[in-house]
C-alpha cells in the first residue's frame, strides 16, 4: 500500500529527529569503541542500535539521508570522556528533550512515533541506568569532600583574614589546614566504609573524598596567593566557592536526576553563614588579643 505523503511541517520535524538519532548513534558507537568495560560497551552498543533503528523509521517517511552533527559528536564524546559517560549521555538526552520535536503531533501522520517516543523515555533511560562508573558510585564521597572543604576552609580563611590581614600568612594557614583536613577526611571515610563492611570500596572512597577536598582547597586558597588585599582575596575565594558549588550541583543534578536549585542554594547559604560567623570571630580575636601582623 502506498504511504500517504506527510505534511511539510511534520517532514521538517522528522528531519530534525533523524539528525538527532544518527548523531547519537555515532556518539554511542564511538564511546563504545573506546571503553574497556565489557558491560558498559554492550549497554552503549544496545542504545546505539536503538538510535539507528529510529533513524531508519524516520527515513522511510522523509525518503532522504541526513548527516549527523559533527560538532555534537565531538562535543558530547569529549564531555562523556572527561566527566563520565552517564553525565555526558544524560546531558545529551536533555538537549534532545529541548529539540523542536512534538511526538504527539508527528504521531497523527506517523504511527510509529508514539512507540519511538516511549522507547526514548523508557527503554533507553533504563539502559543508561545500567552503566557502571566509579564517578557515580562514589559521588557521595566526592560531595562529602567538597562540602567539608568549602565549609571548613572558607570559614578558616574568613576568620584568619580579619584576624591576621596578611594574604601570605592566611594562604599558608589555609594550605596547612587544607592538607590536614584532606588527610583527616580521607582516613575518616576509609574507617567509616571499613566499619560498614565495604572492604573493597573503602580505599576508593577515601581517595575520592581526599581529592575532592583538595580541589576545593586549591580554589579557595589561590586568591590569597594572587591578590595583595586580603579582603579582595576573600571576596574572590567566596566567588570561587559559589562557582565550585554551582559546578558540582549541576553535575549531580544531571548525572543523578536530582533537583539543582535546592542543592545549590542550600550549600551557598550554609557556606555563607559559616563564613560570616568565622569572619566575626576573627574580628573579635583580633580585638581581644590586639593582634597586629
Image: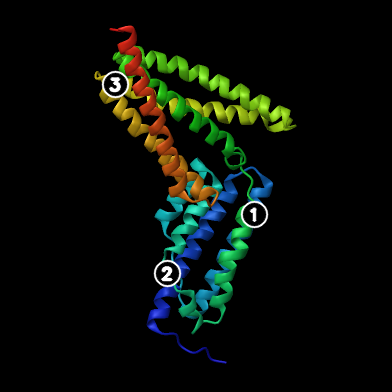
Q: Mark 3 points at which residue?
A: 226
Front residue (pair 207, 230): 230
**As displayed, is residue 238 above or below residue 73?**
above
Residue situated furthest bottom in the rendering: 1
Q: Name the residue under label 1.
A: 43
Circle nearer the N terminus (2, 3): 2
| Disc 1 from disc 2: Cα separation | 25 Å
Residue 146, how many percent across, how many down? 49, 32
Picture quarter with the C terminus: top left
Determine whether the residue tagged by mark 2 lies in a helix, strand or loop: helix
Picture quarter with the N terminus: bottom right
From the viewer's perspective, tell me whether residue 3 is left or right of residue 138.
left
**As displayed, is residue 292 above or below residue 160?**
above
| Disc 1 from disc 3: Cα separation | 47 Å
Q: How crowded is mark 1: few (under 14 residues within 10 Å), some or many (20 or more)?
A: many
Residue 214: tell me if it is visible: yes
Q: Residues within 10 Å of mark 3 (few under 14, many from 20)?
A: some
Amino acid at each position: 500500500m502506498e504511504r500517504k505523503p506527510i505534511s511539510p511541517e511534520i517532514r521538517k520535524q522528522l528531519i530534525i529527529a533523524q539528525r538527532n538519532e544518527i548523531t547519537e548513534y555515532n556518539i554511542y558507537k564511538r564511546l563504545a569503541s573506546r571503553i574497556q568495560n565489557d558491560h558498559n560497551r554492550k549497554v552503549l552498543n544496545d542504545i546505539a542500535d536503538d538510535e539507528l533503528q529510529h533513524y531508519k523509521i524516520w527515513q522511510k517517511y522523509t525518503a532522504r539521508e541526513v548527516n549527523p552533527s559533527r560538532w555534537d559528536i565531538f562535543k558530547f564524546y569529549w564531555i562523556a570522556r572527561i566527566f563520565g559517560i552517564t553525565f555526558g549521555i544524560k546531558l545529551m538526552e536533555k538537549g534532545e528533550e529541548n529539540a523542536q520535536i512534538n511526538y504527539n503531533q508527528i504521531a497523527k501522520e506517523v504511527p510509529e512515533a508514539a512507540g519511538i517516543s516511549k522507547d526514548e523515555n523508557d527503554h533507553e533511560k533504563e539502559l543508561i541506568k545500567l552503566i557502571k562508573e566509579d564517578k557515580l558510585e562514589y559521588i557521595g564521597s566526592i560531595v562529602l569532600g567538597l562540602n567539608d572543604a568549602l565549609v571548613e576552609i572558607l570559614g578558616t580563611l574568613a576568620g584568619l583574614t580579619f584576624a591576621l590581614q596578611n594574604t601570605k600568612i592566611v594562604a599558608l594557614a589555609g594550605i596547612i589546614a587544607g592538607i590536614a583536613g584532606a588527610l583527616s577526611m580521607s582516613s575518616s571515610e576509609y574507617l567509616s566504609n571499613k566499619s560498614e563492611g565495604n572492604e573493597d570500596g573503602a580505599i576508593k572512597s577515601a581517595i575520592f573524598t581526599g581529592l575532592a577536598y583538595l580541589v576545593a582547597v586549591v580554589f579557595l586558597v589561590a586568591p590569597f596567593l594572587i591578590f595583595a588585599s586580603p579582603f579582595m582575596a576573600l571576596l574572590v575565594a567566596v566567588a570561587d566557592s559559589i562557582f565550585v558549588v554551582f559546578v558540582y550541583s549541576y553535575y549531580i543534578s544531571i548525572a543523578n536526576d536530582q533537583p539543582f536549585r535546592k542543592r545549590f542554594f542550600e550549600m551557598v547559604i550554609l557556606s555563607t553563614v559559616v563564613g560570616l560567623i568565622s569572619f566575626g570571630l576573627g574580628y573579635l580575636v583580633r580585638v581581644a588579643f590586639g593582634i597586629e601582623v
